[in-house]
Image: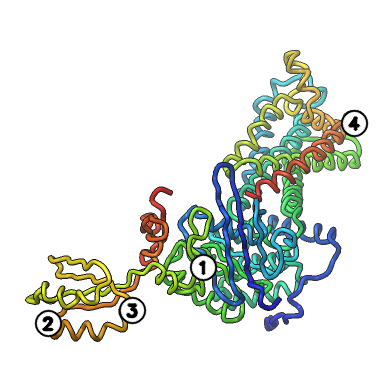
Amino acid sequence: MANRPAIFAEGLYKRYGKTQALAGLDLQAEAATVLAVLGPNGAGKTTAVRILTTLLRPDAGHAEVAGLDVVKQADQLRARIGLAGQYAAVDENLTGFENLEMVGRLYHLAGRVARQRANELLARFDLADAAKRTVKTYSGGMRRRLDLAASLVMTPPVLFLDEPTTGLDPRSRLGMWDIISGLVSDGTTVLLTTQYLEEADQLAHSIAVVDHGRVIASGTADELKQQVGGERFEITVARGGDLTDAMNALRPYSVGEIQLEAERRHIIVPVVNGAHQLAAVVRDLDTAHVPLEDLALRRPTLDEVFLTLTGQPATSDATDNAAPDARPLARSNA
Amino acid sequence: MTIASTPTRAELRPLERPRFVWAIADALTLAKRNLVQIPRIPEELIFATIQPVMFVLLFRYVFGGAIAGTGTTYVNYLMAGIFTQTVIFGSTTTGIGLANDLQRGLVDRFRSLPMAKSAVLTGRTLSDLVRNTFVVLVMWVVGLLVGFQPQGSPLAWLAAVGILLLTSFAFSWISATIGLAVNTVEAAQSAGFIWLFPLTFASSIFVPTKTMPLWLRGFAEHQPVSVIANAVRGLLLNQADPTTVWAAVGYCVAMLVIFVPLAVRAYGNRAAR
């Protein structure tokens, strides 16, 4: 029992009309970790969350959350999970306090306990001052925090966050990341879906990359990057330095084709175990009298991982102006 | 002010009650949620009241003089119809409210909670019943101001109000079914209203049916809205005809028997999308 994963899904299928939303999805998350389900719009992330939170029955497959079957033990399970969605499902015309009190009552808490718990959560999420205002007057970040608070009324052991930071400004996003990290260090298991590579990289203990309703790769961020390979030195030769000398000095380290952008005086050398060779490369370039402007060891970004895995670029979504620094995935033909 | 205390882990557990108690308690929790919003969006209630008031004034003063053969003063004839129309039109808020909850993701939140499934629908229809009761009372006062004089015993008047509320409740479930079947709030709005116009105008709400062409009369005299309006009118004007009254009740019960399961099914289908 103790070693059962907190979230376990095997071969989930779901079809809506002609759309195969899930096509044999497998997921697994150990207790007190964050599993990021990463994928572009329409990859099946939300469908997966809806099945795991008992909102939807799978056409086929099997899933357990907190040791309970999501179909056969749905009623018991609902008392042990929290769900916060990308559409901030709180009532706009109620105050923050009324929203949380209502959720507490619907969890069948005693009235006094529901009210105390509402106040406690409002204070914890920095909403105490806004407790008596209707949610209509809240900012996007405040709504999201209230939505998250509503999902935490019963301190559920497993929490599902469907794109918790989509549409938030960078500051609110960082705040949300802190909250999520705090919950996990208190022992909560979190499954979050995201289109943001950076979010998965920052928060997740493991990542499942989903495309067309299936997991196409999974592991830690480092493992995924490794799986794709593509470690390289990127060198910019200072003006006056001889590019041919530089190429000759670098050739022994290369495990593939060296790229040269002569105009920018930029050389890219694919390598393996670059960190161990860094000192030697610098020494050899020095011996060859190649003056450097810049030298860096680069590992692939999750962007590149996604590109390699799907054969589709992970392009920036032009409509998402709220978070210019974070790039959501979007499939160009989606 | 008391110092806010923190519930202990032991307190943070669901109370144990039988299922049907929770079905009622959850419905009341959601009905309360809907009702506290009404004064916060006063324009909705104001327009919901202005509309029937406008009908009263138009028909009482513009058309009323030209309408004959009602057997009583036209305003007395009219008010029973206005009450009926008011509750029927008012019940469209049920479908609109549900469509709104679906669109905003609130239904997903409710369904992820260990609450009674039925409560989303019963809570909504109950709160709309309370809201409609309020509007009927306002219309009663408006009626008295323009010369409405109910006849007979106040007990019969209460029975009339009872039929009106039953009508409101029954039509709320039809509205719920429509609101859950369509995809957007806007569609719930138009689809919820459009079919009510022929039903309320080709009826005995505003004018006696006997001047209508024969092919229309057959429909207009027997369709539920006319029967309900006639029953209410009889009870308010001391001309109650038990057959009509029971027919009105029968129509409402039949609507509930058909549309409660349909709405429940539509809710299940819709939420599972």
Label 2 neighbour load within 10 Å: few <14, some 14-19, many 20+: some
Residue that numbered label 4 is attached to: B240
Q: CA distance from mark 3 to mark 4?
A: 95 Å
Residue that numbered label 3 is attached to: A273
Q: Which mark is residue B105?
A: none
Q: What's the residue at 7%, 76% (across, down)?
A: A240
Q: Quadrant of residue A312?
A: bottom left
Q: Are marks 3 and 2 in contact (CB under 8 Å)?
A: no
Q: Nearer the viewer, residue A237 or B48?
A: A237
The residue tagged with tag 4: helix, strand or loop? loop
Residue that numbered label 1 is attached to: A36
Q: Are marks 1 and 3 on the same chain?
A: yes
Q: What's the residue at 68%, 75% (across, down)?
A: A117
Q: CA distance from mark 1 to mark 3?
A: 27 Å
Q: Amino acid at mark 1?
A: Ala
In the rendering, at what x and y percent does residue A48 appear?
58, 58
Q: How many marks?
A: 4
Q: Are marks 1 and 3 in contact (CB under 8 Å)?
A: no
